Image: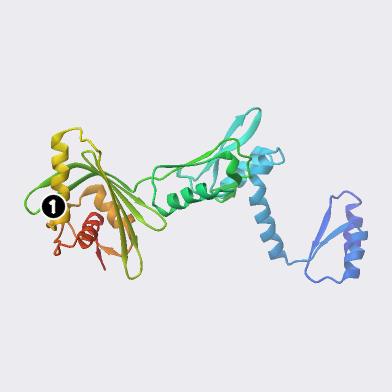
Amino acid sequence: MFDSILESLNGHHRECFLIAPGLPSHKATHLAKQGIHYIDMTGEDFFDGLKSEIKDNAIADFQNGKLSSDTFMRYCKFNDAYPVIETRSDRTVVATIKRADGSIDGNSNWTVLADSELAEKMRNFFDGYSSGKLVIPKENLQSLSFVLAGLPFPEEKFSSEIQLESIPIYDGPFEVIFDDNFEVRGGNARIFRGNKVQRIEVSYRCMELIIFIQIQKHSVNVEIKTMTPEVFDRVSSGLDIFELLTRLFGGQSLKIPITGDLAIAMADKVIPNIRMQQNIILMYLMTRKPLKNILKFVLLILSMTTS
């Protein structure tokens, strides 16, 4: 059959392949003599591998001139991917890839060779113990790969450092009202969600209150750091902070208005499996023991009750 096909082509053919599982070796040898490449696999496995190979190399082949612009764009559109093409230093590159609605989805993997100091910074950053920016120097970066809209970008050599920044799920006003009508207004709260802890940063006057909450299966671990200046800018600021801490650690009951973006952040992103109460959360600090007061104050900030 193969001899008949080759004769009909009369030499006007490119490379030929036969895809079939389990062909005897003597038949594979005969095919090779006829210029036919034998591939020992099923058609389904072959096309799955071919699709994967095309997807893994589409961007690299386009940027290296092995794939035409028209073919590349049609392939991307078929996969609901819309590349943004740019010319940089006489080289055509894919700057980014979007979905039809303009959104960008993807992930990245990178390898870092870190000393103990950098490793500690990275753990604290991803676990949630620190916020702000994390800088990874270029000399510590080993490899980087990006996948956007399902299409892998070729690995790039690093020419600069990487900067990561933690974004709060809530950043806005924060109020506390004690039951003797002492009000804490004009404060600001920022809530971060890490891999291990929730980090809450409360700014009031010139005081910074940082709360770490680690929720485990049968317990809640809380750590609180309070930072105040040695000298207050105003006497009124010092008095307000003194009044706040006295009431907080003295065991007074308090309430926190939960509205707008704060309510959305609490319900959707802080901790799963919570039951929200509407309007104003009111919880009484029933004990004079400071540790329990702190824990209940944290729960108030989180505005939650366990289901």
Of all residues, the one furthest to the left in this rendering is 180
Give the percent coordinates (x, y) of residue 270: 32, 56
Give the percent coordinates (x, y) of residue 106: 51, 49
Nearest the viewer among 177 and 234 is 234
- The residue pinned by badge 1 equals 247
Is 42 above or below relative to 129? below
Nearest the viewer among 240 and 58 is 240
What's the amino acid at mark 1?
A: Arg
The quadrant of the image that shows the C terminus is bottom left
Instruction: Name which quarter of the figure residue 18 lies in.
Output: bottom right
For image coordinates 39% across by 48% down, the residue present is 130
Query: Does residue 198 appear left or right of residue 62 in this picture?
Result: left
The quadrant of the image that shows the N terminus is bottom right
Visible in this render: residue 18?
A: yes
Visible in this render: residue 279?
A: no
Is 247 above or below relative to 95? below
Give the percent coordinates (x, y) of residue 194: 39, 54
Give the percent coordinates (x, y) of residue 274: 28, 63
Nearest the viewer among 52 and 275 is 275
